[in-house]
Image (tube, grey):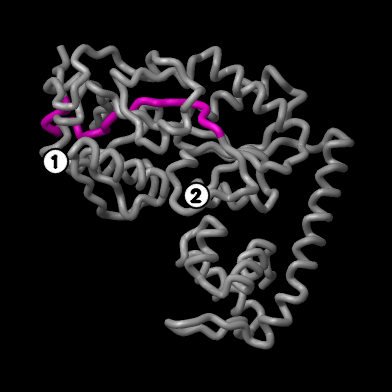
Amino acid sequence: MDVHIRELRYFAVLAVELNFTRSAEILHISQPTLTKQITKLEAQLRTRLFDRDRRRVVLTPAGAELLRTAPELIAAWERIQAGVTSIGRATGTGSLSIDIWGHHQVWASMISDLAISRPDLPIAVSMRRNLPAALQALADGGLDAAFGRVPGLEGPPDPGLRHRPIRLETTSIVVSARHRLADAVTVTPADLRPEGIWFPQTLSSPELGTWARDFSAWSGVGITVSGVNLGMDHAAAELAADPAKTLLLPSQMARGGGPLRAIPIVDPSPCWAWSVAWRRDDANPMLAQFLGILNGIARREKWLDFDPRLHWLPEIDLAGLAGLTRPTRPTGSQPSGDTTQSATPAKERR
């Protein structure tokens, strides 16, 4: 099996810090992920690189030798990567690599429109399993930009990455057609308290997990995590089979029809803040063009407009919006009258 540059990067940080928790924070990954990658690297090299117990982590002689050569290997790969990328740009064969959340149609539609209107800006689309994986690919040079709720990730930010809010989106619930709220046109946070919100398995998108915890603390709506996370189709099947389950999603991802109902949340509307992230030292000239186009669309479509009287965001997202927004209604929101948290009861379909 081949050793990957990512594993060498992880090793190099751990070899200096000699602490799994601190190294995972620096790398912006979970400690189990770091442990798994180091174990994989040791298996590939067929030797122990660290002696570790509950109290300390120390380099083995083999680990010390790898630490001597790993920075050189990483630097050599970065030179090769930069050279190949520059040739691609110079010959017109390069592209802009963008990671999107595959279930969110806004980003896919926008990139599709760009492919038609800007053939000079070729874009390669990537769909990684979650935002931390996309940010790691950014750090490794495998991506130029990614979308996600970056402030919602736990741990210190990567100093090599930049990000900014780009789109606010209201949220909706998805329920079975047999759910007690299925005939409602809109629901309020208070309407969700009896059953609470359900998410499959362990919230594989960490930024969704932190958002859900903040929403629960603010609204008093309980969170239940169960089952397995096998994608949106499987989640839809679980919802259809259980009339007590309520799934909460950004509105553009909430799909009704058939045995399911998608219902906007109002009074106030909880919002999801999308950010765009990129690497500080990314020299791809197409990146600046893309970010400029994206910012222009955000201004024209008023993606960052926000009214604190009608909508809610976690404090960490509000901090990121400082100076970027003016008070008005965000994308996908529904007009509402009473703005108190106590909430008007669910409005039924006519």
Q: Residues within 10 Å of mark 2 (few under 14, many from 20)?
A: few
Which quadrant is the N terminus positioned in? bottom right
Using the image as rendered, state which of residue 209 and residue 246 is in the foreground.
209
Dominant secondary structure (helix, strand or loop) of the stretch shown in magenta: strand
Label 2 close to label 1 by CB (< 8 Å) = no
**Relative to 111, does residue 94 appear above or below in the rendering?**
below
Q: Identify the secondary structure beneath mark 1.
A: loop
Using the image as rendered, state which of residue 89 and residue 48 is in the foreground.
48
Q: Determine which residue is flagged by label 2.
A: 129
Judge from the rendering whether residue 86 lies leftward or rightward of residue 31; answer left or right.
Answer: right
- Residue at x 66%, y 69% (from the top left corner): 12
Which quadrant is the C terminus positioned in? top left
Name the residue type under label 1: Glu
- The question of residue 175 being in magenta is answered with yes
- Residue at x 43%, y 43% (from the top left corner): 152
Measured as percent of width and height from the top left, residue 244 is found at: 14, 41
Measured as percent of width and height from the top left, residue 127 is found at: 55, 43
- Residue at x 66%, y 80% (from the top left corner): 45
Residue 273 picture quarter: top left
Residue 195, label in figure: 1
Judge from the rendering whether residue 318 lies leftward or rightward of residue 16; answer left or right.
Answer: left
Name the residue type under label 2: Arg
Q: How far apart are marks 2 and 1 (CA)?
A: 29 Å
**Relative to 167, does residue 6 appear above or below in the rendering?**
below
- Residue at x 74%, y 23% (from the top left corner): 119
Q: Find the magenta span and give its range.
A: 164-182
Using the image as rendered, state which of residue 248 and residue 102 is in the foreground.
248
Q: Is residue 213 visible?
A: yes
Q: Identify the secondary structure beneath mark 2.
A: loop
